[in-house]
Image (spheres, grey):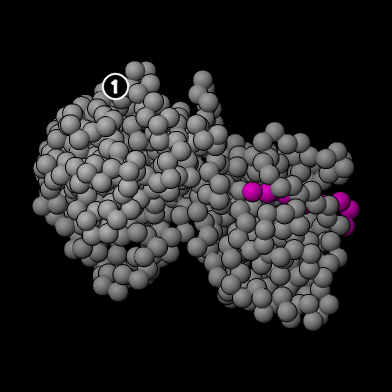
Amino acid sequence: MCGIFGYVGKNNNAAQITLEGLKLLEYRGYDSWGIAVKSGKKLDVEKHVGKIGSAALKSSIINHKSSIAIGHTRWATHGGVTVQNAHPHLDCTKTIAVVHNGIVENFEELKKDLIKKGHKFISQTDTEVIVHLIEDFLKKEGFASSVRDAFNLLKGLNAIVVVNAVSSEIIAAKNGSPLIVGIGKDEFYIASDLIGISDYTNKIVFLKDNEMIILGKNIKLLSLPKGSRLKEKIEKINFKFEKSSKGNFEHFMIKEIYDQPKIIRNIARNYSDQVRKMSHLVESAKGIFFIGAGTAYHAGLAGTYLFSKNAHMHVNTSVASEFNYLEDFLTKESLIISLSQSGETIDVIEPLNIAKKKGSKIIAVTNSIGSTIYRMADFNILLNAGPEKAVASTKAYTAKLCVILMLVFALIKKEKEAELLLNNAAKEAERILEDNNIKKIKEIAKTLKDSKNIYVIGRGLSYPSALEASLKIKEVSYIPTEGLAGGELKHGTIALIEKGTPCIVFAPKDETFESIISNATEIKSRGGVIIGVSSKKSDVFDHFIEIKGLAQAAFITQIIPLQLLAYFLAVYGGLDPDKPRNLAKSVTVK
Ligand code: F6R
């Protein structure tokens, strides 16, 4: 969601630097974008609806030869996707502009007051109130205190970056989404994540909640509530953004599906030490909770089954956004294992903030070094899955499953067994990705592409797989799907099965096999078409996707054919699987 980038310093091509920065943040998901650049004592703004892609800036903007600019990629919340609603937003005098990530919950009342005072609004956004508020304060005080006073009036979780053409300063303030400052030689960068900055410098200040920073000739950090000066902590982060290319693949999603064998193998070979350390934290905790959103939640849910089955331990898994309402019982001895590819998901950050206040321990399993969740954690495991650019998560999901499997086996002192299982899983992933299997999945996708709806069932460890397969299919193909536990069918959903309704059935050869085949038979008796995902053929299957028996690791690889199916359903539906409508890669707004 919304990407922010800004530059102030010795170079006089600030607009171009900002455009390049925004392009790196494209993956976060957006629908429009814009840049504000200083032109004399005023600001000039260029905004567009749609993709930055290979966009170039208008020559009028480039010609300003300015050394200060800010930019934004917008994912609409308040107000439609229009050029007017795109950020940056200007004040009435066109000397200050703001870009924003978050939601100003009290924007309506603030806007009414500002209109009464004569401010002219040109957008429907909540963001525009911020710049007019600052403008109002500027009539009686300096730039820094105006930004601070304005920010302190905002309700909700927000991050803003403001540029002032008169003072030639950028000020950023936040109490929610991430903002990161890069310090170069006589220059500063600000961005919503490291990826935008790491090409320029490794000297980083991570702005904390309730802080504001002034960037101009110097850097100055202030407390938002008190206005007092703070000492900025400059960290050296040696992170090089691995530019990901699609190679010979048509989309990132398919490329990332193919990355999986390598990632599984890497975890098998290189994670035993760090996972053992993690297992000590698990052993000393009283009350362990997995939290995550969407796909990450499904990985946690699989963890609950694995812990129970192998380590005979109960671990709760909660949808991260619901954990806010379940935290009253947390203590200093509780352990939260937060799962997040981006490390920036607000729904995970919020409950972690509460857990931290209660003194609970936090483990972060993320794919993003230096991300907010990474920095909040007492212990980190990085997935090292490489950049995941497609909005739909694939390789980060299987990587999380591998880490959880290693963790459970470390607890029962069977690390070598886990390594073996994962090495076999890597081989099985390679087999699933062989051409003849792809051909088969393509054929199934062709028969399903016009389906009105698709159901996916599984039991035990395959229940999270059913939820994940359903999510993957719906988000990239837009075909309504429902994933459910096989046992739940008769409690409602079977009412929707009619002649020709497709149902995907996860039937690994484990203790769930007989019962899930019974469920498949019940669906088939009502006219349903069964797509069986199993190591054993059954008469009830109309289509058969073979997965080789992998004992305890089948739950990792059996999702791969379904990721492929989702991908081909999107392609055959004429859709871009990498950028599904309305979705963002990094969900930084509640
Ligand atoms: C689905 C998907 C999302 C994410 C969710 C959490 O394919 O990608 O459901 O899994 O938004 O994101 P992270 O893992 O970045 O916290």
- The verdict on residue 404 being magenta is no
Residue 568's quadrant in the figure? top left
Residue displayed at 71% across by 70% down = 129
Residue displayed at 23% across by 60% down = 491
Image x and y of residue 421, in percent: 19, 31
- Which residue range is magenta in the image? 31-41
Q: On the picture, is 482 further left or further right than 222? A: left
Residue displayed at 79% across by 64% down = 122
Image x and y of residue 148, in percent: 66, 71
Residue 425 visible to an observer of this rendering: no
Residue displayed at 75% across by 39% down = 16
Main secondary structure of the magenta stretch: strand
Image x and y of residue 43, in percent: 83, 55
Asked if residue 541 is positioned above or below residue 49 in the image, the reply reads above
Asked if residue 186 is positioned above or below residue 356 in the image, the reply reads above
Residue 575's quadrant in the figure? top right
Mark 1 lies on residue: 431
